[in-house]
């Protein structure tokens, strides 16, 4: 059955996973380098660099094919995106509540697109890996 | 949904990997279906039934839980 359409998401080849993992240590080295070259760098700015790189890393991992990309993996992927979005809403809600309790306001400079993208991609990746782990567990 | 894949595999002397190769999925997928952890699509269920030369309802059966 052919169900290809403009809604189909093209996935990256499996080899891209190795490339994605480069994005995790890279911003830490970059931030350390920045701290040495410019000691006035704000911690929030450094955090945004890390969130941005990690968001890209998890984004690539989420859009990379598994070795066998069969219907079960596709259903896990679909569930992971739904669960990841659900966790993001609750996670952001919790962060806003913590911020409100600590600083008496719901919003904060730390709530940036980088943080949201990082959390979303992290939750999607986690939800996917949990399902893969559960399927691999022996009966 | 319960199934008789394990019994049919034994009848045909097939490993999970053999069956997985025949229906173009991973061994984990066959393992998850056998264990009732994953419900296959209609297409995959038909493919599995075809390997065992049986109608799909002989391999996959609904349980009371499926009607809740």
Image (cartoon, rainbow, N blue to C red):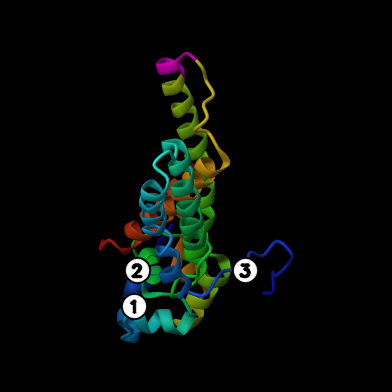
Q: Which label number is shown at residue B35? A: none
Task: State the residue lying farthest toward the top.
Answer: A104
Q: Which residues are magenta?
A: A100-104
Residue wearing tag 3: A10
Residue wearing tag 2: B31
Q: In the structure shown, which secondary structural element does the residue marked by tag 1 occupy? A: helix
Picture residue at 49% right of the left edge, 76% below the top: B49
Q: Nearer the viewer, residue A76 or A124?
A: A124
Q: Is there one chain holding both mark 3 and mark 1?
A: no
Find the distance from the CA under tag 3 to the CA under tag 1.
29 Å
Find the distance from the CA under tag 2 to the CA under tag 1.
7 Å
Q: Which label number is shown at residue B16? A: 1
> Where is residue A98 shown, x and y percent of the image?
41, 22
Q: In the structure shown, which secondary structural element does the residue marked by tag 2 occupy? A: helix
Residue A26 shown left or right of residue A92 in the figure: left
Find the distance from the CA under tag 3 to the CA under tag 2.
27 Å
Q: Is residue A57 magenta?
A: no
Dots 2, 1 in contact, CB < 8 A: yes
Above-or-below relation of A111 to A4? above
> Where is residue A29 shown, x and y percent of the image?
36, 56
> Where is residue A76 shown, x and y percent of the image?
47, 58
Picture residue at 52% right of the left edge, 63% below the top: A74
Parent chain of label 3: A
Above-or-below relation of A90 to A122? above
Q: Nearer the viewer, residue A56 or A49?
A: A49
Q: In the structure shown, which secondary structural element does the residue marked by tag 3 occupy? A: loop
Above-or-below relation of B47 to A77? below
Residue density around tag 1, few if under 14, some if 14–19, many if 20 or more, within 10 Å:
some
Q: Is there one chain holding both mark 3 and mark 2?
A: no
Picture residue at 36% right of the left edge, 49% below the top: A36
């Amino acid at each position: 059955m052919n169900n290809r359409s403009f809604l189909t998401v093209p996935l990256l080849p499996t080899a891209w996973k190795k490339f994605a993992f480069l994005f995790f240590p890279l911003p830490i080295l970059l931030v350390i380098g920045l701290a040495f070259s410019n000691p006035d760098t704000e911690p929030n700015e450094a955090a945004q660099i890390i969130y941005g790189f990690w968001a890209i890393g998890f984004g690539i991992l989420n859009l990379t094919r598994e070795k066998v990309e069969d219907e079960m993996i596709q259903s896990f992927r679909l569930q992971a995106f739904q669960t990841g979005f659900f966790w993001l809403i609750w996670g952001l809600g919790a962060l806003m509540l913590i911020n409100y309790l600590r600083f008496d306001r719901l919003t904060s400079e730390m709530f940036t697109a980088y943080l949201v993208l990082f959390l979303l991609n992290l939750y999607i990746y986690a939800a996917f890996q949990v399902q893969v782990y559960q399927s691999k567990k022996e009966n | 949904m319960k199934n008789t894949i394990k019994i049919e595999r034994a009848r045909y002397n097939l490993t999970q990997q053999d069956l997985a190769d025949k229906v173009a999925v991973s061994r984990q997928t066959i393992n998850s279906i056998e264990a009732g952890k994953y419900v296959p699509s209609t297409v995959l269920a038909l493919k599995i039934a075809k390997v065992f030369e049986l109608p799909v309802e002989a391999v996959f059966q609904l349980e009371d839980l499926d009607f809740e």
